[in-house]
Image: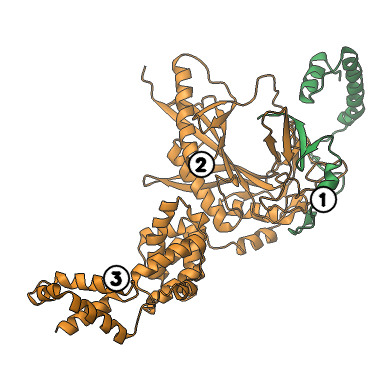
Amino acid sequence: MSKVYETVIGLEVHVELATKTKIFCGCSTEFGGAPNTHTCPVCTGMPGSLPVLNKAVVEKAVAVGLATNCNITRNCKFDRKNYFYPDNPQNYQISQLYYPICRDGYVEIEVEGKKKKVRIHEIHMEEDAGKLVHEERSDSSLVDFNRSGVPLIEIVSEPDMRSAEEVIAYLDKLRLIIQYLGASDCKLNEGSMRADVNLSVREVGSEEFGTRTETKNLNSFKAIARAIENERERQIDLLESGEKVVQETRRWDDNKEYSYPMRSKEDAQDYRYFPDPDLVPVIISEEWIEKIKNSQPELRDEKIIRYKEEYDIPEYDIMIITASKKMADIFEEAISLGAAPKKVSNWLMGETMRLMKETDTEADNLKFSAENLAKLIKLIEDKAINGTVAKEVFEKVFAEDINPEKYVDDNGLRTVNDEGALRETIQKIIDANPKSVEDIRNGKQKAIGFLVGQTMKEMKGKADPSEVNRIIKEILG
Amino acid sequence: MVITDETIEYVGILAKLELSGEEKEQAKKDMTNMLEYVGKLNELDTDGVEAMSHAFPISNVFREDEVTNGDDRENLLKNAPDKKDGCYRVPKTFD
């Protein structure tokens, strides 16, 4: 008893590339069209149709390969993977088996302060399948081929991970690299990034790998962590009771939090790969690679270094802001529009994070524009609104990306800078609160706060509290 | 090379075909013939010859990433044996 087991994990990550068109035809990849309105003879597998490779797919795949330290295959080819399933109209998927576009890379991850390399076995290009909708109370399914032919890359890691934490760090690293490259938006919950977990267990110290299983249908980091824990326990239980782990593909059920085998034993797994005769080889020259390298945008690690040099903001803020391409973009754009880096950072770290938490919004899904944040910051700088009003306006900016200048004017939220009007109100408050005035005269400074509060209330928040404070002191001598 | 009963059985499963005994015999004969025909190539010495995936020496045929296809759903669905709500209708299938 009490053997100590180690979990060995490798990942197959599918990423939908952010191209305008599909991998082999000029159909749009746009999400959410009515069923089958983004299809043509090629992506519905009509006999006699001819696939022609989208150049942008090759360039994005090479960009990801370069950013993950891979060797680029100079002479790469496409193969057919044969299987029958109604979401696959050709009865084969065009993929790459023999000459994948990238090989032998790695990314560096950090878990609990420890750095580690996760090696990438290969990255290959392939096409996505269509979508099946199962009709309730009927014996039929409906097929929508809008996703059929959407370009994917599959990133296959070596079995280098040992825990759910390492898996999540690895996925996060890939997500950030790919998002920064603009190669994909990498949203797990929307399926533009999908991870299949290959997992086996072995006794600590053992050199040999155990029998592995593959778990699919993992749509969130939480599901991945749970599925890993669950599968590890399941395999250890089998081994402890003297049984064997069966090599199989399992499907995770996120509601019931367990996995079950996907295919029955009668289903032979034999894809009979062979080179696709419809597609000619892709030869990637040194010049082409150089060109892609030179047009690569600044990646996160580079951004972190530059922010440290250029902006006077805490390292913690830099890490949070750069943890999402979207937030880093807002940050930089607001600065380019004239807002002070420190101020932008404060709004992102403070109110933005608070509202994100409150509305359960991820940074990648932020809706407001840098322009409107910059305008809001300008309004505060100009003392056109005070801090309390600004927070109120920002909630609107956050939710609906409203123009704060217009909103402030439409709702009469501008601070009253007319000192005459302000003095008049203050005098009224002073006259109405003789007790407080007496307290102040007797040295109870706290009572000033009460008068400031009353004035702000009377002014409906549209006054600068420090200004009110100054005038009260002046009147009371 | 002779196609065995086991091979025909296996290929039948892969192709999702249910063949009668008579059809199996015919398929065995046909496939054996085909393999013998291309088997001639095995007589050649191909050491040091790189495998080709395409009959013509061309490479790098690309499209630019521009949308060229519009909505042709009605025409495409004309090929479908069964359809519903703009979709192809097939026997119920699960993962």
Tell if the residue under mark 1 belongs to the same chain as the one under mark 2. no
Residue A468 % position (x, y): 25, 78
Instruction: Indicate which label's residue lies in the foreground, 2 or 3.
Output: 3
Residue A410 % position (x, y): 47, 74
Task: Work out whether residue A81 or residue A386 is closer to the camera in this orientation and state it.
Answer: A386
Q: Earlier in the sequence, mark 2 or mark 3?
A: 2
Which residue type carries mark 1? Asp
Pointer 3 chain:
A
Residue behind mark 3: A457
Pointer 1 chain:
B
Task: Work out whether residue A297 or residue A405 is closer to the camera in this orientation and state it.
Answer: A405
SS class of the residue under badge 1? loop
Name the colour assigned to chain B in the rendering: green
Mark 3 closeness class: few <14, some 14–19, many ≥20 residues within 10 Å: few
Does residue A87 appear in the picture of this structure? no
- Disc 1 vs disc 2: Cβ atoms closer than 8 Å? no
Residue behind mark 1: B72
Residue shown at 66% from the left, 50% from the top: A32
Name the colour assigned to chain A in the rendering: orange
Residue behind mark 2: A220
